[in-house]
């Protein structure tokens, strides 16, 4: 039986500092990974895991890159024999459509992977 992790909302608050995005992806990664007591930028053959914990490998991406996030999370999960999580960074409500696309893809294919949303809305 496959288990699908449910959508989790995590709130990260920071002031806007960049034109295109409020923060760099790496800033979200460091904040969230530290909360999980994980290691960042773990190098493996074929990639670099954004965050690794005892049970999880987590890929962070801005919501428009949802498909890339999903693929990398699946690859890292298989490489490390852990549960993969695609953690999408949503800085604006209009980007929630990408979260829906991610979750529909996970559900349709019955993928063993978690999805999360990191929000930073004013």
Image: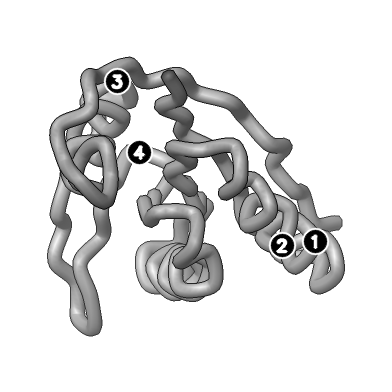
Q: State the residue in front, 75 or 2.
A: 75
Q: Where is 105 relative to 23, above or below?
A: below
Which of marks 2 and 3 precedes in the sequence?
3
Callouts 1 and 2 close, C-beta under 8 Å: yes
Q: Please state which of the two labelled residues, at mark 4 or mark 3, is closer to the viewer.
A: 3
Q: Callout 3: helix, strand or loop?
A: helix
Give the position of the N terminus as an image quadrant.
Answer: bottom right
Is residue 55 shown left or right of residue 111?
Answer: left
Numbered mark located on residue 35 in the image? 3
Callouts 4 and 3 close, C-beta under 8 Å: no
Residue 111: give x, y in percent of width and height. Answer: 72, 65
Which of marks 4 and 2 precedes in the sequence?
4
| Whole-number angstrom distance, CA of label 4 to CA of label 3 | 13 Å
- Residue on which the image places disc 1: 104
Task: Give the quarter of the image for residue 68.
Answer: bottom left
Q: Mark 4 packing: few (<14 Cα in 10 Å), some, or many (20+)?
A: few
Q: Callout 1: helix, strand or loop?
A: helix
| Whole-number angstrom distance, CA of label 2 to CA of label 4 | 28 Å
Residue 70: give x, y in percent of width and height. Answer: 53, 67
Residue 12: give x, y in percent of width and height. Answer: 36, 20
- Residue on which the image places disc 4: 54
Q: Please state which of the two labelled residues, at mark 3 or mark 2, is closer to the viewer.
A: 2
Q: Please state which of the two labelled residues, at mark 3 or mark 1, is closer to the viewer.
A: 1
Residue sitting at the far bottom: 46
Which of marks 1 and 4 precedes in the sequence?
4
Task: Give the quarter of the image for residue 106.
Answer: bottom right
Q: Please state which of the two labelled residues, at mark 2 or mark 4, is closer to the viewer.
A: 2
| Whole-number angstrom distance, CA of label 3 to CA of label 2 | 27 Å
Residue at point 41%, 27% (across, down):
120
Q: Callout 4: helix, strand or loop?
A: loop
């Amino acid at each position: 039986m496959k288990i699908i992790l449910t959508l989790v909302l995590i709130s990260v608050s920071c002031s806007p500092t960049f034109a295109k995005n409020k923060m760099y992806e790496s800033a979200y990664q460091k904040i969230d990974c530290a909360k999980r007591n994980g290691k960042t930028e773990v190098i493996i053959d074929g990639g670099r895991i954004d965050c690794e914990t005892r049970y999880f490998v987590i890929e962070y991406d801005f919501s428009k890159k949802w498909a890339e996030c999903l693929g990398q999370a699946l690859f890292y999960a298989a490489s490390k024999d852990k549960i993969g999580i695609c953690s999408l960074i949503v800085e604006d409500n209009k980007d929630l459509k990408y979260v829906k696309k991610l979750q529909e893809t996970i559900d349709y294919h019955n993928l063993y992977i978690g999805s999360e949303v990191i929000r930073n809305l004013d």
